[in-house]
Image (cartoon, helix red, strand yellow):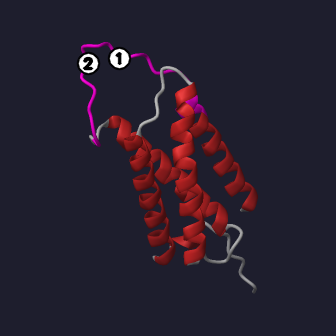
Amino acid sequence: MQVLSTTMLGSYFALLVFGTHWPWLPQQPDWVPVPTGFALGPDKIAHITAFAGLSLLLAFWMQSRAARLTWRHYGVVALVLALYAPLDELTQAWVPPRTPDVYDFYANLIGIGIGLAMFFLAERMGSRRFLTIEVDPT
């Protein structure tokens, strides 16, 4: 299970870094309105979804190394990703036409919270049995 969780986390993280730093986005024409503030459009939903997935996989990776996640584990996941989120945004300044956006950072934090809440609920509701292999001692 550790190999699977490590492979999934590593692959997802690599795709996330590639997707957020590859200059594949075309420049918007001047006549296209650019939303200001935290407008919940496709861009923010993508940020929320991406970081919810990353937090789920990081929690799954930690669970593969511990019997059950404690609040300390959840705090470590939240802290690590909360430190990575601004780094991800700031390094986009070096990849034209990408630009850092504080509202994208906020969307990343919301995604981290949603992903951890989903993992917590799944673990507490007994869905954990689908993530582990149990051996019958008889």
Q: Is residue 61 left or right of residue 104?
A: right
Asked if the residues shown at circle 2 and circle 1 are in contact, with their CB atoms under 8 angstroms apart, the answer is yes
Q: Is residue 67 left or right of residue 85?
A: right
Label number found at residue 120: none
Q: Is 39 included in the stretch rendered in magenta?
A: no
Q: Which residue is mark 2?
A: 32
Q: Residues within 10 Å of mark 1 (few under 14, many from 20)?
A: few
Task: Give the CA separation, mark 2 to mark 1.
Answer: 6 Å
Identify the image quadrant of the N terminus: bottom right
Q: Is 110 left, or right, of 30 in this rendering?
A: right
Kindly identify which residue carries mark 1.
28
- Residue 12 vs 61, above or below: the answer is above
Snapshot quadrant of residue 4: bottom right
Q: Nearer the viewer, residue 67 or 30?
A: 30
Point 57% across, 30% down: residue: 21
Tell me the kind of residue under disc 2: Val
Residue positioned 52% across, 20% down in the render:
96
Report helix, strand or loop for mark 2: loop
- Amino acid type at mark 1: Gln
Pick whichever, 110 or 91, lies toward us. Answer: 91
Mark 2 burial class by Cα count in 10 Å: few <14, some 14-19, many 20+: few
Q: Residue at x 62, y 44 (%)?
A: 13
What percent of the width, then of the height, locates residue 119?
A: 49, 66
Q: Which portion, as a residue range, is magenta?
A: 18-38
